[in-house]
Amino acid sequence: MSGVSENRVLAGSPSTGEAARGGLIADVPRRALILLGLFAALLLVAPATVGDYLLSVMILVLYYAYLGLAWNVMMGFAGQFSLGHALYIGLGGYTAGALFVHYGLPPWFGMVVGAAVAAVMGGVIGALGFRFGVKGVYFALLTIAFAEFTRILFDHWGWVGASSGLYLPVEYRDTDDLWLLRGSATMFYYVILAMTAGAFILCHWLLQRRVGYYWQAIREDQEAAQTLGIDVFRYKMIAVMLSAAMTAIGGVFYAFYYNNLYPETIFSMHRSIELMLGVIIGGIGTLFGPILGAIVLTTLGEMLTGLTEDLGLDGIKQMSYGVALLVIIVYRPGGLWPWLRRRLGLEKPR
Amino acid sequence: MTGDLAAATAPMLRVDGVGKSFRGLKAVQAVSFEVPRRGIVALIGPNGAGKTTTFNLIAGAMRPDTGRVFLEGRDITGLRPDRICHAGIGRTFQLVKPFGELSVEDNVIVGALRGTHDVGAARRQSAKILALLGLDDKAGLPAHSLTLPDRKRLEVARALATQPKLLLLDEVMAGLRPMEVDRMVATLRSLNEETGMTILLIEHVMRAVMALSHWVVVLNYGEKICEGTPGEVTSDPRVLECYLGDEAL
Ligand SMILES: Nc1ncnc2c1ncn2[C@@H]1O[C@H](COP(=O)(O)OP(=O)(O)OP(=O)(O)O)[C@@H](O)[C@H]1O
Ligand SMILES: [Mg+2]
């Protein structure tokens, strides 16, 4: 117990808190590392201790955490608002799914192709938006337009099953085939855990680099950023394309985990909103916010799903997401993570 | 070779007949002046005279309708602001534009990354600049928590961090107390003397203009009405006239 008081001293004054929001700190407090280690260990041993249902919920949490991290690169770091990220989930899922169904190509190959396709699509949207000065809400509308357009396209495209959907053959096997991503829930759990950890580490690394500083400068004030020599167009393009590619890889996971893809659901606006809600609740622009947000929102959603099934009340889930969002916007506008981080005494030791 | 020679003998900045109108309002009209290498030139004039607009035309924030801008003999007219920064011009904004959520130090690091990819090197450089401007004790604070005078200092620090040959300062002394003005003047003078940095500054604080500048250019209603040494312009009847009713002098 004596360690606690010692760390409280290390945690520094609360006034330095806000500055760390961008997470540009290399000098993470010891206590943060310990907590992170504990959290990681818990995640690693979870499948051995929890039941099937809880495992499926945890997969969902990690899936949304992953998508949130991807969206956060564009919105949280570079300040570019996308309301159409379902587009990239769909592109990744369909690309890898179709290559697997039609040619038997492994998802790892489809992942690369899907990420590339999504990056190109993101690049097209970004180029259009940024070149012609489409900003803020209008840029968000542009991203929705592309998602809707693609949904309609896929609805009529026979090769990917059109509106009746694309199905991945489900095989029942005793062994996990990591190469073809066919196997048990435990295997899928570790796959999405690795993806989320990878995305987290990538984001942490990017924030320490020049590109991370430049993104945040652009987010805070584009004119000032440009005056300091930043090629604003180029760095915004990097953010959009990277975010799109990361999101598409999430889509590949979705395709192989659920084994079915419908344009109606995967490209829907609903999906786009869902993936950003967690980030807003957890804390936009922070590293841990998307993960915390996914935990809170998915847990809430699961609890309410159980409740609505018992009571036969529809729409409660969406409504309570709305309420949760409202509460956060009013009481913790920066999201839960900056507040929780302060509570846990994880501030920069300065 | 003639190009190199021209570049070596050309003034740091040559503004040649630049003009800019906003919906018929002629904010800047056929303004020409030069800033010699290692010089400190002040741009003065009453409110709305077109000083900030002139800066915008030099730094690429706006493209001039007429005229050209040369940096060391190289035509930089209409280049993008980031290109102009890389060409060697650093500027501050009269209406300060800090990166509010970033720490003071991180603000300056962004500037210092103009010359290096290495964040560590940029951090070391920014520490020196923060100390120079007396912001070192506030390095860890978020920029949005600074007072206006400190934000002005941060503007200067960030622009300096890009290691410019020519520094454009837009009213960085406004709101500073007399002692703070003297300190800023001393800092700028030593930068000019020790590193040879050329400075063009817009300033209403005449105390600073008189103390710092080698040459003064006066604008009124978008036009250059005169230029000369600080002593010359402050006794020029045209200058006194344009400031009449304007309490500045
Ligand atoms: N972006 C703009 N759009 C329209 N009019 C503008 C714009 N920028 C400046 N102006 C107008 O141009 C004129 C010159 O403005 P400018 O900001 O250059 O003056 P200034 O000399 O910097 O004044 P101050 O000392 O008050 O800062 C003013 O009449 C101003 O209203
Ligand atoms: Mg001005």
Image (cartoon, coloured by chain):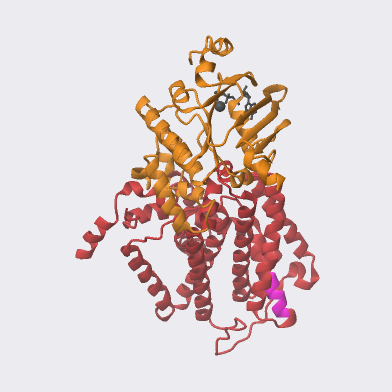
Q: Nearer the viewer, residue A151 or B220?
A: B220
Of helix, strand and loop, which mostly describes the magenta segment? helix
Disc count in the image?
0
Q: Nearer the viewer, residue A334 or A167?
A: A334
Q: Quadrant of residue B200?
A: top right
Image colour for chain B is orange
**Over which residues does the magenta segment extend?**
A94-101
Residue A99 lies in the magenta stretch: yes
Residue A315 lies in the magenta stretch: no
Q: Position of residue A161 (x, y in %)?
A: 76, 72
Q: Position of residue B203 (x, y in %)?
A: 50, 26
Q: Quadrant of residue A10?
A: bottom left
Q: Position of residue B19 (x, y in %)?
A: 70, 27
Image quadrant occupied by the N terminus of chain A: bottom left
Q: Is residue B216 left or right of residue A30?
A: right
Q: Position of residue A232 (x, y in %)?
A: 61, 49
Quadrant of the image where one finds ligand 2: top right
Q: Which chain is red?
A: A
Q: What residue is drawn where x is 68% and y is 72%?
A: A113
Q: Quadrant of residue A228?
A: top right
Q: What residue is drawn where x is 60% and y is 47%?
A: B86
Q: Is residue B149 above or below residue A73?
A: above
